[in-house]
């Protein structure tokens, strides 16, 4: 099918000087990590301490990786630590020289491979807790959390707050490591077996939570204060991350911290899990959000080669492993492949798929270094820390429905987390889609209002702009909500009419289902999509009598130089539930309408299984085409090659050239004035196109 890929004019041109300056300021600390890289992680068991470092490095280089992530310390020290609370791996005595870390660092340095230290401070041995009982996690009844003989510790207590720093200092003083990664860096309410232990009630948590909130600790997720606890926990981890990041930067400026928002490199893990429904675009979403909110910081996606933690020796479907990393690099993250044990131990058949992506990145450093988001559309992601679980799940369903709808219709977008909404952030986009976002602050509503008046366009659905702390927002197309219909039963057999036909029967109708709002539109709003009120639907002899209602389901209002379009029902969730393309197109056509007058248009001729992602780096405009035809059940299988995908890239100039990185011979380039016509003969798992001025 033919569709349009809409991109802001700046997506195909050079960055303005002021943008260059702002971009540089966002890089908190310059280092090797600001240039594209690939990582290979060997997550070692205690029995693997005798591994052959030279053979391992041979395999890492063959994989295309430029950094090795190796277990160094935390639960077990893989070097002869002198700290009494840092337990040595008992198998170190079987290794000649007794120091895996020394051997690995020296061998990696000789080859020009960077060595990253994997640390895990989540658990310690019982002997450590006997000496320091105040470090342990405690349930509401005072019990320890013990798994496979190890005891969980609490980030609020002194092991994290002081002991962790001493261990890091010991590593830095002995080894020239190039970075640190901290595994399971957080509060452990659930263990490896899935057992829920609840909120930590150690003395440090009780004191800190009371001081921060004035409230007593909740027991578990059913407690009304649990959301407050999650916010407290996030703030605690963010603060701790900032402290340890600054600590490492001061003591070894050449080393990066791979972790959360305050680290040098932002970390995401891509994995599968038993019993967890697959969100096929999870990596895409997470990386997009981090690259939008923190564009000056590189991101790393650690793709898990095994199926799930209880099945670490069973490999993931190869195409699934590849898909993790394809989504990662398309959004501007660095690829990392994660296996258990030595490289020549457990069989993981997906490694070649991961290697193909890693080699592409490390062979094209100019393209992937600093690859940043440049889509003209922002899709706002709901914030789970601001709403209760049930309400967040509803907003999340609306978000994922919109995500797929935009993706299938080749509308390029970036993910903007709701908590990052500000006037400065909004101004980066031509259109902002608010899918049932109902947790905005008064300041954020004011930023949206100013954005619209200055020429921005908002498309809102569900309760966005209709319900929230302040009720109907000033920027909304509605003046008030006359009735919030929340029961599906009340909507059964009602419809939304998409065309201008006078009669109901024979019109283009879509089901009105989920959550819909009866609103009074502002006098300056133009309504469309009449609501068809319910009528009998059974038995068939009585299934008639539908008449248009007195209101419309959608309205558009001009405000200043911009506009807001309101879809007063959960259109995204409806599309996610039913998959009717007529529902999808009712939503995305409103986005196209808002875009049409503001931006240059890149036309795409290809099926909806092709996803188009835009990025920009020093190399020029980078267009990734991802083939999603392999999506199945709870994973990805082999993709069906998609042939003859065509793109028109407008306004790039007569001197523009293009190349394909995956299969160079597949691309044919023609010129039509200042436009480039790109014809890709076949897209396998993915293709990467680079458009630059000659």
Image (tube, grey):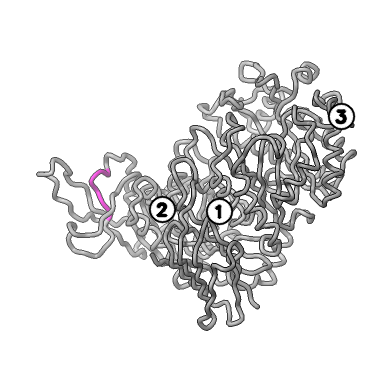
Q: Is residue 661 visible?
A: yes
Rendered location of residue 266, percent (x, y): 68, 48
Within 10 Å of disc 2 (Cα), the crowding (few <14, some 14-19, many 20+) is: many
Most foreground residue, 308 or 589? 308
- In the picture of the structure, the residue carrying the numbered disc 3 is 81
**Helix, strand, or loop for circle 1?**
strand
Within 10 Å of disc 1 (Cα), the crowding (few <14, some 14-19, many 20+) is: many
Marks 1 and 3, the one that precedes in the sequence: 3
- In the picture of the structure, the residue carrying the numbered disc 1 is 416
Marks 3 and 2, the one that precedes in the sequence: 3
- Up-down relation of residue 694 to residue 70 (above or below): below
The residue sitting at 50% across, 40% down in the picture is 387
**Is residue 66 rendered to the left or right of residue 543?**
right
- In the picture of the structure, the residue carrying the numbered disc 2 is 461
- Up-down relation of residue 620 to residue 110 (above or below): below
On the rendered image, what quadrant is the N terminus found in?
A: bottom left
Rendered location of residue 308, percent (x, y): 57, 34
Q: Is residue 559 visible?
A: no
């Amino acid at each position: 099918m033919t569709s349009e890929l809409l991109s802001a004019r700046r997506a195909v041109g050079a960055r303005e000087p002021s943008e260059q300056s702002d971009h540089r300021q966002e890089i908190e600390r310059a280092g090797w990590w600001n240039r594209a890289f690939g990582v290979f992680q060997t997550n070692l068991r205690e029995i693997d301490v005798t591994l052959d470092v030279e053979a391992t490095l041979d395999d890492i280089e063959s994989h295309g990786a430029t950094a090795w992530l190796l277990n160094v310390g935390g639960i077990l020290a893989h070097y002869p630590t002198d700290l009494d609370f840092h337990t040595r791996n008992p198998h170190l005595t079987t290794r000649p020289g007794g120091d895996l870390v020394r051997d690995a660092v020296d061998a990696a340095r000789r080859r020009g491979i960077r060595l990253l230290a994997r640390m895990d401070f989540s658990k310690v041995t019982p002997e450590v807790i006997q000496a320091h009982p105040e470090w342990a996690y405690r349930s509401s009844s005072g019990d320890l959390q013990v798994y496979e003989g190890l005891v969980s510790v609490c980030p609020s207590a002194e092991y994290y707050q002081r002991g962790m720093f001493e261990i890091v200092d010991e590593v830095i003083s002995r080894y020239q490591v190039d970075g640190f990664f901290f595994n399971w860096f957080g509060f452990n309410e659930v263990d490896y077996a899935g057992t829920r232990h609840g909120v930590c009630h150690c003395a440090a948590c009780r004191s800190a939570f009371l001081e921060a909130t004035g409230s007593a600790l909740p027991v578990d997720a059913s407690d009304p204060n649990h959301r407050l606890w999650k916010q407290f926990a996030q703030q605690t981890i963010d603060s701790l991350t900032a402290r340890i990041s600054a600590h490492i930067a001061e003591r070894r400026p050449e080393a990066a911290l791979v972790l959360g928002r305050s680290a040098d490199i932002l970390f995401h893990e891509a994995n599968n899990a038993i019993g967890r429904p697959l969100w096929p675009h999870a990596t895409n979403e997470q990386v997009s959000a981090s690259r939008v909110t923190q564009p000056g910081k590189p991101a790393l996606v650690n793709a898990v080669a095994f199926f799930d933690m209880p099945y670490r020796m069973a490999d993931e479907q190869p195409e699934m492993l590849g898909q993790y990393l394809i989504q990662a690099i398309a959004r501007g993250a660095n690829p990392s492949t994660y296996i258990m044990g030595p490289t020549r131990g457990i069989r993981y058949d997906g490694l070649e798929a991961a290697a193909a992506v890693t080699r592409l990145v490390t062979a094209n450093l100019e393209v992937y270094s600093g690859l940043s988001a440049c889509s003209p559309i922002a899709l706002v992601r709901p914030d789970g820390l601001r709403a209760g679980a049930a309400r967040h799940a509803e907003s999340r369903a609306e978000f994922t429905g919109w995500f797929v709808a935009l993706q299938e219709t080749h509308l390029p977008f970036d993910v903007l987390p709701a908590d990052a909404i500000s006037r400065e952030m909004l101004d980066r986009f031509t259109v902002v889609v608010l899918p049932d976002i109902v947790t905005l602050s008064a300041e954020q509503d004011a930023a949206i209002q100013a954005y619209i008046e200055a020429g921005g366009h908002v498309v809102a659905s569900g309760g966005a702009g209709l319900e929230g702390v302040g009720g109907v927002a000033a920027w909304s197309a509605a003046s008030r909500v006359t009735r919030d219909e929340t029961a599906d039963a009340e909507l059964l057999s009602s419809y939304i009419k998409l065309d201008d036909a006078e009669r109901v029967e024979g019109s283009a109708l879509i089901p009105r289902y989920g959550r819909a709002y009866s609103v009074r539109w502002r006098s300056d709003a133009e309504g469309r999509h009449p609501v068809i009120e319910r009528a009998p639907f059974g038995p068939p002899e009585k299934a008639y009598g539908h008449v248009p209602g007195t209101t419309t389901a959608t309205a558009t209002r001009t405000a200043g130089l911009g506009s807001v379009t309101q879809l007063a029902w959960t259109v995204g969730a409806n599309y996610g539930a039913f998959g009717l393309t007529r529902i999808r197109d009712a939503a995305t056509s409103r986005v196209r309408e808002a875009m049409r007058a503001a931006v240059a248009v890149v036309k795409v001729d290809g099926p909806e299984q092709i996803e188009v992602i835009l990025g920009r780096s020093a190399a020029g405009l980078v267009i990734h085409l991802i083939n999603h035809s392999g999506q199945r059940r709870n994973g990805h299988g082999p993709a069906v090659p998609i042939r003859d995908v065509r793109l028109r890239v407008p306004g790039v100039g007569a001197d523009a050239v293009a190349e394909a990185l995956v299969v160079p011979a597949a691309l044919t380039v023609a010129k039509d004035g200042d436009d480039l016509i790109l014809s890709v003969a076949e897209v396998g798992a993915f293709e990467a196109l680079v458009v630059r001025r000659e």
